[in-house]
Amino acid sequence: MPLEYRPPAERIAKGKAYPHALLGHHHYIYTLAFSPKGNVLVSGSYDEAVILWDVRTRQKLKTLPAHSDPVGGVDFVRDGTLIVSCAGDGLIRIWDTSTGQCLRTLVHEDNAPVTAVRFSPNGKFVLAWTLDACVRLWNYVEGRCVKTYQGHSNCKYSLSGAFGTYGGEDDLTPGKAFVVSGSEDGRLLCWDVVSKEIVADLEGHAGPVLGVDTREDGLMISGGVDRTVRIWAKEPDIGNAATEDEAAAGGVHKDHVGLIRADNHRNQSQEDNVSMQ
């Protein structure tokens, strides 16, 4: 049984870096993700490789010759048994974490570069962002694209987003699932997962929105080329979600804000909300 490892709290609180760097890639590192238990790290690089790391020993576990173009996104499934990766070669690959074997390769007929990927909370689907202004939902077991979300602008930047829920007023009323993505025109768009209807169109950034994440209490966070981090408050109906005046803008960074994640510990009911039923 793998050991669960978490960095000492005092290092996190004081912002101290570990003295030993993880060396193995030969070019820029674009994307990182921890396994659910925190004991394994996966990284993707411009060198076209995906590397799995033991967090405790800081040693390489496996190097996967994953793609023929720079790797733009990686993610773990919720139980940590699978990894998904994507790249500019237009391929999405599903990997067995323990063996490093490629279990499935997904590719759309358009073969557009894939810039980011994310497993659904229930682990049954993969969401992928591509440079043809599409966000696609894949049933990776069957190897088919089941939904395509459109309406945002994306032909240059590596954008990303997240899953969330809306509508449920209490614990007895399950919410509906949505997908949110940044857009190069400064907007955040939210689509109902099943109907593909745009249920929220949020404006606030003064440039491309590169990273978006959601929290289970309804908050959304976003960051972009305008160097700001914005927090979006939940309203009873996501169609009336926070506007620019209601969104709290964080301090200004010195450069683009790209990868962004919320502290989010989802319970079982929320994880199962992403359903194609």
Image (tube, rainbow, N blue to C red):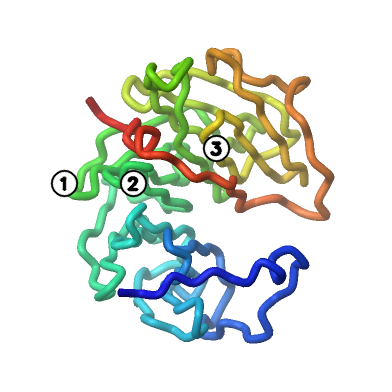
Image quarter (top left, top right, bottom left or bottom right) of the N terminus: bottom left
Label 1 CA crowd tier, 10 Å (few <14, some 14–19, many 20+): few
Image quarter (top left, top right, bottom left or bottom right) of the C terminus: top left
Residue 39 at x, y percent in the picture? 45, 71
Label 3 CA crowd tier, 10 Å (few <14, some 14–19, many 20+): many
Q: Amino acid at mark 2?
A: Val
What is the C-alpha distance between the residues marked 2 and 3?
Answer: 17 Å
First along the sequence among labels 1 and 3:
1
Which residue is under mark 3?
A: 214
- When asked about the image quadrant of residue 51, the answer is bottom left
Label drawn at residue 142: 1
Residue 28 at x, y percent in the picture? 59, 73
Identity of the residue drawn at 70% across and 50% down: 257
What is the C-alpha distance between the residues marked 1 and 3?
Answer: 27 Å
Name the secondary structure under disc 2.
strand
Asked whether 82 or 36 is in front, the reply is 36
- When asked about the image quadrant of residue 95, the answer is bottom left
Label drawn at residue 126: 2
Nearer the viewer's eye, disc 2 or disc 3? 3
What is the C-alpha distance between the residues marked 1 and 2?
Answer: 12 Å
Nearer the viewer's eye, disc 1 or disc 3? 3
> Is 108 placed left or right of 74 in the picture?
left
Name the secondary structure under disc 3.
strand
Q: Amino acid at mark 1?
A: Glu
Label 2 CA crowd tier, 10 Å (few <14, some 14–19, many 20+): many
First along the sequence among labels 1 and 2:
2
Asked whether 81 or 24 is in front, the reply is 81
- When asked about the image quadrant of residue 251, the answer is top right
First along the sequence among labels 2 and 3:
2
Identity of the residue drawn at 47% across and 53% down: 115
Q: Is residue 15 above or below residue 148?
A: below
